[in-house]
Every structure is written in C-alpha cells, then in structure tokens.
Amino acid sequence: MEPITLTTGRLLLRPFTDEDTEEVFRLCQDAAVQRWTTIPSPYERRHAEEFTGEIAPEGWRTSTMFTFAVAPLGGGPPMASSSVTLRTLSGIWEIGFWLGAEHRGRGIMTEAVTELARWSFTRLGATRLEWRAEVGNTASRAVALRAGFRMEGTLRAALDNNGTLRDAWLASLLPSDLGLAGSRTYLPAPVPAGP
C-alpha cells in the first residue's frame, strides 16, 4: 500500500521519514518506553535509523504493518508512534503505540489510537483489532480502554520483551464497538441464563 496520512482534530498521523530519526532516538531514551515496549534497550541511534529508514517503510511496502508518526496537526516533529500489524489473514490486526514522556496526559494517544482503529476497520477491512501489553503497563491499558477496547484476559508467556517471556494483557475492539459496520457477519456466543 502507498503510505497515507490521517488527521484528527489535533493530530497528523503520517509515515515516518529519515528526518524523524533524531526525534525518534530522543523520545525512545525514555525509561518507560524502553521498559514497556519491545524496542531494543538500550536504544541506540542505529535503532532509530533502522526504524525510520527500514522497518517502518518495509511494513508499508509489504502491507503487513502500517506505522504512523503521530505529530501535531499544524506541523512539528513526531510525539509518538502508532502502528497496526497483520496477525491473521482472516482480518485480525494488532495495534501498538508509544508516546514521548513530555506529551503524556493530554489524550494524544487515545485520539491517535481511535483514528487508527477507524481506519483499520474502514480501509483495511479489519474484522478485529487486538491490543496487547505486558501485565503492569497501566498507562497503555488506560489508552486502550479509553479508545473502546474490551479487556479479554491475561495470556501467559505471550510477550517477548528483549529475550524474556512475560505475561500480557489482551483486549479487543470490533467495528461495532465504534458504531461501524463489519466486513463480515459476527455471531456472538449466547449469554447463559442466570440461576
């Protein structure tokens, strides 16, 4: 797919470019980003170069991962990263994100995740969007919940964080959760009658 841009009331979601390398490197020095995401730690400049110059563009070329720089609508350097990654050919995608420390607490990530979710359902034909985070990452969980995701449980040893398997929270979002029509019929399991 050719890279595209998305906009919200305050944000521009656009593909990363080589010009973003220094800001990505700076933002990824944050201890919380390194602790709670699967980026390399320590995060070196070469990792930022690989991310902006190879990893993010390759996902667009192969249509398997669409990574967006989250920047102010009026212009400026990226504040965050958000991506959707294809998990199954039946339309299940996974969303991931990180946000620079100085940009937290203003609803930026929730706004970006909600827009990316809408795009995933309407443009990619996603049938289900999943969010996973290491158990304990309460900030990421709060963003997912504010964006409408529903918690489904804890997966044991489901997340590889720099060579160590960790338990992960799992939540999902369906098109209907955002008031959108799905691309496929969904028949939920019947709710058992009470005692």
Image: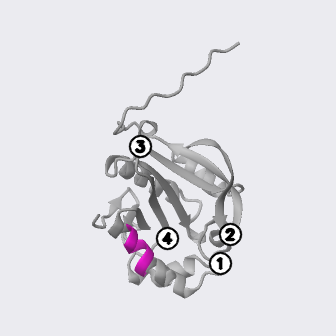
Quarter holding residue 68: bottom left
**In the image, which residues are magenta?**
53-59
Using a 10 Å C-alpha cutoff, classify the residue at mark 4 as few (fewer than 14 neighbours), some (14 to 19) or many (20 or more): many
Q: Judging from the image, what secondary structure is the residue with disc 2 in?
A: helix
**Disc nearer the start of the sequence (2/3):** 2
Q: Judging from the image, what secondary structure is the residue with disc 4 in?
A: loop
Using a 10 Å C-alpha cutoff, classify the residue at mark 3 as few (fewer than 14 neighbours), some (14 to 19) or many (20 or more): many
Residue 44 coordinates in the image, percent (x, y): 59, 85
Q: Is residue 28 left or right of residue 134?
A: left
Using a 10 Å C-alpha cutoff, classify the residue at mark 1 as few (fewer than 14 neighbours), some (14 to 19) or many (20 or more): some
Using a 10 Å C-alpha cutoff, classify the residue at mark 2 as few (fewer than 14 neighbours), some (14 to 19) or many (20 or more): some
Residue in view at x 55 percent, y 52 percent: 131
Residue bearing mark 1: 41
Residue 160 coordinates in the image, percent (x, y): 65, 64
Q: Can the viewer see residue 176?
A: yes
Q: Where 189 sits versus 172, above or below? A: above
Residue 127 is tagged as 3
Residue 35 is tagged as 2
Q: Quadrant of the N terminus?
A: bottom left
Dot in front, 2 or 3 = 3
Residue in view at x 61 percent, y 51 percent: 142
| Secondary structure, magenta segment, majority class | helix
Q: CA distance from mark 2 to mark 4?
A: 18 Å
Residue bearing mark 4: 79
